[in-house]
Amino acid sequence: MAYNDLREWIEALDSAGELKRVRAQVDPILEITEIADRVSKGAARKYPRGGPALLFENVKGGNGVPVLINQFGSERRMQMALGVDKLDEVAERIRQLLNMKSPEGFLEKLKMLPMLAEMGKFFPKIVASGPCQEVIRKKDFSFLDFPVLQCWPQDAGRFITLPCVITRDPRTGKRNVGMYRMQIYDATSAGMHWQRQKVAAEHYREMLRIGARGPAAGGEQAHIPSTAERRSGVDIMARSSGGSMLAEGERPGGTMEVAVAIGTEPSLTFSAIVPAPPDVEEFIVAGFLRQKPVELVKCQTVDLEVPATAEIVLEGYVKLDELRTEGPFGDHTGFYSLEDEYPVFHLTCVTHRKNPIYSTTIVGKPPMEDAWMGKAVERIFLPLMKLTLPEIVDVNLPVEGIFHNLMIVSIRKSYPGHARKVMNGIWALGQAMFTKCIVVVDEDVNIQDIGEVVLKVFNHIDPERDIQFTLGPVDSLDHAARLPNFGSKMGVDATRKWPSEGFARPWPDEILMDEKTKSLVDKKWKELGIE
Ligand SMILES: Cc1cc2nc3c(=O)[nH]c(=O)nc-3n(C[C@H](O)[C@H](O)[C@H](O)COP(=O)(O)O)c2cc1C
Ligand SMILES: [Mn+2]
């Protein structure tokens, strides 16, 4: 079942008892964070883990715009958002899609037709008009017409935390939707925190490479950069550090158009955080998740399309020669992410629905709302990881490992060195490149049970032999790395070691009672009178 907009989603949450409306006045500066944090950590005792979604209806200085927060903040709501009873159902749908084999004979081809028709539902549809443009403001607008939060005391200011940032690849015309926070500098400029390994940052670099000659979308011939243009783009990128993509004094000029949708229906919001392969449009991912096309409308002032039912749309551009200090920001590591240089988004037009709803989230010490989103990604991506690494049995990203610090993976080991092959494969797999520590165990370990993991991993390793270090890109949020974005990573091979791996000693059996004794005690259990 698909929600057509945020409002239908809020209604569904309400009727499922998953939403709490708050009528008391609250301050978007710090206070909403403190409330939402307590709810995430269990202060709302009537509710299961993660607490309810919150709709603040009376926000100080918020022009009457309500604030929705914690919409994804429990297992149940994450399932509801994706229209399933178990997240593994989504994984199963992906598995079926990947399992497709070529039909043999006419009958099998006929049987495929409904499947192909089904796939038509994944693609977005451009419609002539949509509620997101009920109100169009081409002048006298400000980010602060909306109740944008300051989340934590040492944050550099107010941040839009749940924006779907839409950009276009200037070479292919393909769109990308990524969730990148935006720090409000003033009424019409904001930091655009796309980290340098993310897709929108690559679109930005691509614009630099082609000398900002304009997008080649819409079937136009793509501009092929000259060697000199390429070299200058590469130079700019190589010389800059951290989030910087331009060297000081470098002025290639030009702009890149950007649109931001806030308050989208949940499958689209979720698809903006999904680490899909760079060339996969998130509008298609959302269409797949909701089994219904996403409807898009053309923007007013930029050549981009936005979800027709979004609550709020920000249209604007990023200058290719402008960077500004972004941060600090209280991040999902539980620490403040450091200041760094990022591009600046300039607002050219705001469109919104009548009586818009502002949707947001906070991050901080786990568990918080994003923990549930991350767990959904873990489940849904398992079949996709298995496509490249079929020996993987299961994956666990413990919430306190904040998704990039720790990945536990069980494998069906088949040859010497197999665990190390898997580590290297994971470090080469899209955003999994950021994984600071990968622990690999045999398939008989239930990796969803951390107690069992600790027991077996630390029994099984000879640290000097079984730990593998490597160097490479690390998450921009990693404050311990020797350099921003570059550092070391560790793999732990906790699989049982084989003679073919040079392990000559016998390997002991795990202690397990025999079945005969177990069933004997089962039968006598009552008679023993212990319970
Ligand atoms: C609440 C939330 C906030 C996020 N903020 C950022 C951010 O500021 N910058 C960033 O690069 N990634 C951020 N991410 C992660 C990206 O959304 C994620 O890596 C996504 O896959 C990027 O999309 P892309 O692959 O199309 O670039 C955030 C994720 C969540 C759940
Ligand atoms: Mn993407």
Image: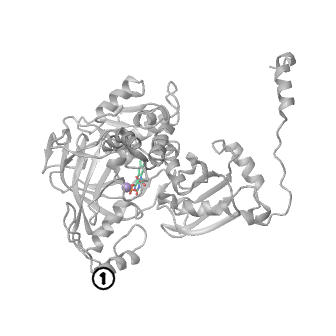
User: Residue drawn at (52%, 42%), measured in percent from left and top?
Assistant: 367
- Placement of 120 over or under 245, stated as above or below: above
Instruction: From the viewer's side, name the closer residue of 286 and 476.
Output: 286
Instruction: From the viewer's side, name the closer residue of 281 and 267.
Output: 281
User: Residue drawn at (41%, 49%), measured in percent from left and top?
Assistant: 273
> The N terminus is located in which quarter?
top left
Picture coordinates of residue 141 (x, y %)?
A: 17, 49
In the rendered view, does 46 fall on the left or right side of 206?
Answer: right
Name the amino acid type tagged 1. Answer: Thr
Q: Taking the image as drawn, is residue 23 in sight?
A: no
> The C terminus is located in which quarter?
top right
Picture coordinates of residue 103 (x, y %)?
A: 42, 47
Residue behind mark 1? 227
Picture coordinates of residue 89 (x, y %)?
A: 48, 37
- Placement of 268 over or under 226, stated as above or below: above
The outermost residue toward the left is 139
Instruction: From the viewer's side, name the closer residue of 264 and 486.
Output: 264
Instruction: From the viewer's side, name the closer residue of 188 and 393.
Output: 393
Q: Hey, which quadrant is residue 148 in on the image?
A: top left
The outermost residue toward the front is 105
Binning the other alpha carbons within 10 Å of mark 1 as few (below 14), some (14 to 19) or many (20 upward) gives: few
In the rendered view, does 482 fall on the left or right side of 218?
Answer: right
Q: Is mark 1 within 8 Å of ligand 1?
A: no
